Image (cartoon, helix red, strand yellow):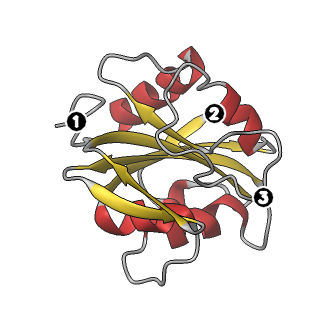
Amino acid sequence: MMLFITAANSAPAAPGAYVLWLRLVSPLNVLVGKRGGALTPGDYLYCGSANGAGGLRARLARHMRKDKRTHWHVDQLALAGKILGAFVEEGANECTLNAALDGFPIPLPGFGSSDCRRCAAHLRFWPKGAALPSDWENARKAAESRLPLERGAPGGA
């Protein structure tokens, strides 16, 4: 079952996959391996997995911290932008979640998928007005009905 969370302590401490919702308010130059690229302002969805100790809760706690060294590609976005929340699913696979976003553009090939042979990238740009899969949108709406959240329109402020 898909959940939407805004704080890591709301995530299950079980293995699974997640999609971080990140917002950039200004352009960002990033490195993907030895290649550089630029990300434009807007909303991004990053697909990842959490199969180690502490599961989804531990991995999302790390992503949501600002005091960390850059280790994964997504750390560059997390440090420069704002994490608006995460879609999480116990026992899920990051490539399956990424495939659900197939219609969303890939801003930088290889971003977040250097260890994946299936996906061109694990980062998607969320265009303004683009609809999420219905179970994701239902999870987000359910979370918003429980908590007063600050939200802008997808794709920007």
Residue under the image location 39 percent in, 17 percent down: 130
Which corner quadrant holds the N terminus?
A: top right
- Is 34 drawn above or below residue 114 in the view shown? below
> In this image, 28 relative to 17: left or right?
left
- C-alpha separation, residue under disc 1 versus residue under disc 2: 24 Å
Residue 126 seen in the current view? yes
In this picture, residue 26 sits left or right of residue 79: left
Q: What residue type is labelled 1?
A: Gly
Disc with the residue nearer the chain's start (1 vs 3)? 3
Q: In this view, does 117 lie above or below 82?
A: above
> Is 123 situated above or below 69?
above
Query: Between residues 114 and 152, which one lies in front from this camera angle?
Result: 114
* Residue 81: quarter of image: bottom left
Q: What residue type is labelled 2?
A: Met
**Element under disc 1:** loop
In this view of the protein, can residue 1 be seen by the observer? Answer: no
| Residue drawn where x is 66% and y is 55% of the image | 12
Mark 2 or 3, closer to the camera: 3
Q: Which residue position holds label 1?
A: 156
Q: Mark 3 points at which residue?
A: 115
Label whose residue precedes the other's in the sequence (1 or 2): 2
Q: Which of 41 and 45 is in front in this view?
A: 41
Residue 136, given in percent of the width and then of the height, sits at 54, 26
The residue that mark 2 highlights is: 2
Q: Measuring 21% from the left and 34% from the top, which residue is drawn there?
A: 152
Question: For mark 3, does the 10 Å Cα neighbourhood hold few (<14), some (14 to 19), or many (20 or more) residues?
Answer: few
* Frontmost residue, 139 versus 52: 52
Looking at the image, is mark 2 or mark 3 earlier in the sequence? Answer: 2
